[in-house]
Image (cartoon, rainbow, N blue to C red):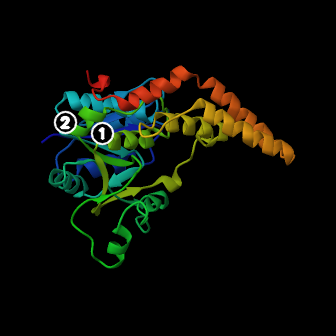
Amino acid sequence: MKVFVIIVTYNGIKWIEQCLNSVLNNSFTVDVIVIDNGSTDGTPEFIELNFNQVILLKQNENIGFGGANNIGIKKAYKEGADYVFLLNQDAWVEPDTIVKLIKAQQNEPHFGIISPMHLNGSGDVLDYNFSNYIMPSKCENLYSDIYLNKIKNSIYQVDFVNAAAWLISKKCIETVGGFSSSFFHYGEDDNYTHRVKFHNFKIGILPSTRLFHDREQRKTNVYFQNSDAIYKREIILKASNPFSEFSFFSEYKKRFKNLFKAFCKFQFKEVKQINKQIRILSDLNKKAIVKARNESKLTKPSFLD
């Protein structure tokens, strides 16, 4: 049994020691691959000095979360990985987290992705965004089982869980592939879960395991929260979802309808924003959308070749 932990770093000096120690000192022997996306805060140098057992793949620039993970997944696969465990640089696991996830997946191999419960960095509350993924409408019975102390020793199915900690099976990787190149940062894990379900795998949470995710202390890049960037990401995500039908005509129709309403109400700030969205739609030429959609439906991922 070979398990590779894959960690993408970008100026993660604040967390990387705790992150690496948690996987290197866990109860299951793992290989660790770190892909550094051009950090300037000394992260790769710290790893080289203190963690020489880690495979460090340094990039000259930030190639994005999905792109960097794909490098690690491809290397792990070629080294004979049975599982890869994707872990954020600002997260860490308990000693038995990985082995419990593996045993659960072996018992229920139709789950392509399994994740532990996500706590905040202090471990005193659930990570807020994660708590939304396991609400009753998205994860049947988990909330009530927690409250009634009836947690099952099995996996609870969810629609989505963010990629801060994913155990992915070899079969899932061979079928679904890696992250889509249509996403640089954010949206890639949403797209991947769409594809996982498209290929008849399930996504789940194992509540007997825990992850600590210190994202409350993380500075967010303003660009990724920019309304134009968010809209562009939403369109690509919608278009690349293999379960949905996408139409440029419908999107333009919706935008122009909203534009007319905004003009009639003298909402000129809204008018300006909708005009930006129309330009973004124009820039997302059909070729880019077809590429994103085709990537989502691949059954023999070329990146593993």
| x and y, in percent, of residue 87 in the image | 35, 45
Disc 2 target residue: 81
Residue positioned 48% across, 57% down in the render: 129
Circle nearer the N terminus (1, 2):
2
Q: What residue type is labelled 1?
A: His
Judge whether 70 appears above or below 104 on screen.
above
Judge whether 148 appears above or below 76 on screen.
below
Q: Answer few, some or many: residues within 10 Å of disc 1's Cα (few below 14, many 20 plus, some between 14 and 19).
A: some
Q: Which residue lies furthest to the left in this view?
A: 1
User: Which of the 4 image quadrants contains residue 262?
Assistant: top right
Q: Residue furthest bottom?
A: 148
Q: Quadrant of the C terminus?
A: top left
Q: What residue type is labelled 2?
A: Ala
Residue positioned 65% across, 40% down in the render: 226
Q: In which quarter of the image is the N terminus?
A: top left
Label 2: which secondary element? loop
Q: Answer few, some or many: residues within 10 Å of disc 2's Cα (few below 14, many 20 plus, some between 14 and 19).
A: some
Disc 1 target residue: 199
Is 78 positioned to the left or the right of 218 in the image?
Answer: left
Is residue 279 shown to the viewer in this render? yes
Residue closer to the observer: 44 or 117: 117
Residue closer to the observer: 299 or 50: 299
Residue positioned 42% across, 40% down in the render: 243
| x and y, in percent, of residue 253 in the image | 68, 36
| x and y, in percent, of residue 151 in the image | 27, 71
Residue positioned 30% across, 22% down in the render: 302
**Distance of label 1 from label 2 (alpha carbons):** 21 Å
| x and y, in percent, of residue 141 in the image | 34, 69
Is 127 positioned to the left or the right of 156 in the image?
Answer: right
Is residue 181 shown to the viewer in this render? no
